[in-house]
Image (tube, rainbow, N blue to C red):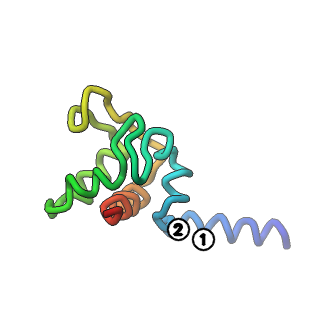
């Protein structure tokens, strides 16, 4: 019975994209370089939201950068790729970051 419940929980968790919030950002190691309100190694999420506020394709751009990495936008240090983030989680994280106004 216990094995069935664990299998069911894992299947449901894998099927639904994770809800984006601070906990997901922590789980995917975003907070190692970013903070919500202040610059660390990378820009704050509020600064990212402000920079991309008027761009219609901002969520797609940020989701791609989360997965593939990027550089040159915020200075000389590149953002490393994060291959452990699914496309669904990257899109959810990008939407969450853009809401940090």
Residue drawn at x 39%, y 46% as measured from the top left: 38
Residue nearest the viewer, comparing 101 with 30: 101
Describe residue 89's horizontal placement relative to residue 75 as left or right. Answer: right
| Image quadrant where residue 98 sits | bottom left
Residue drawn at x 40%, y 58% as measured from the top left: 93
x, y percentage for residue 44? 36, 48
x, y percentage for residue 7? 71, 66
User: Tag 2's secondary structure?
Assistant: helix
| Image quadrant where residue 60 sits | bottom left
Q: Residue furthest top?
A: 76
x, y percentage for residue 16? 51, 69
Pick the quarter of the image with the C terminus.
bottom left
| Residue position for label 1 | 12
Residue nearest the viewer, comparing 1 with 89: 89
User: Tag 1's secondary structure?
Assistant: helix
As measured in the structure, the alpha-carbon distance from the residue carrying label 2 to the one carrying label 1 is: 5 Å
x, y percentage for residue 19? 49, 68
| Residue position for label 2 | 15
Residue nearest the viewer, comparing 29 with 46: 46
Q: Is residue 90 above or below residue 67?
A: below
Please tell me the numbered disc located at residue 84: none
> Mark 2–mark 1 contact, CB under 8 Å?
yes
Residue drawn at x 85%, y 73% as measured from the top left: 1
Residue drawn at x 84%, y 69% as measured from the top left: 2
Neighbours of disc 2 within 10 Å: few (<14), some (14-19), many (20+): few
Describe residue 92's horizontal placement relative to residue 48 as left or right. Answer: right
Total marks placed: 2
| Image quadrant where residue 55 sits | bottom left
Neighbours of disc 1 within 10 Å: few (<14), some (14-19), many (20+): few
Describe residue 94's horizontal placement relative to residue 17 as left or right. Answer: left
């Amino acid at each position: 019975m216990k094995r069935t419940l664990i299998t069911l929980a894992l299947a449901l968790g894998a099927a639904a994209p994770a809800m984006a919030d601070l906990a997901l950002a922590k789980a995917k190691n975003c907070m190692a370089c970013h903070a919500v309100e202040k610059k660390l190694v990378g820009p704050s999420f509020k600064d990212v939201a402000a920079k991309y506020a008027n761009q219609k394709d901002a969520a797609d751009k940020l989701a791609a950068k989360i997965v593939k990495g990027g550089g040159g936008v915020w200075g000389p240090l590149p953002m490393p790729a994060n291959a452990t983030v699914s496309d669904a989680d990257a899109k959810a994280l990008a939407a969450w970051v853009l809401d940090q106004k």
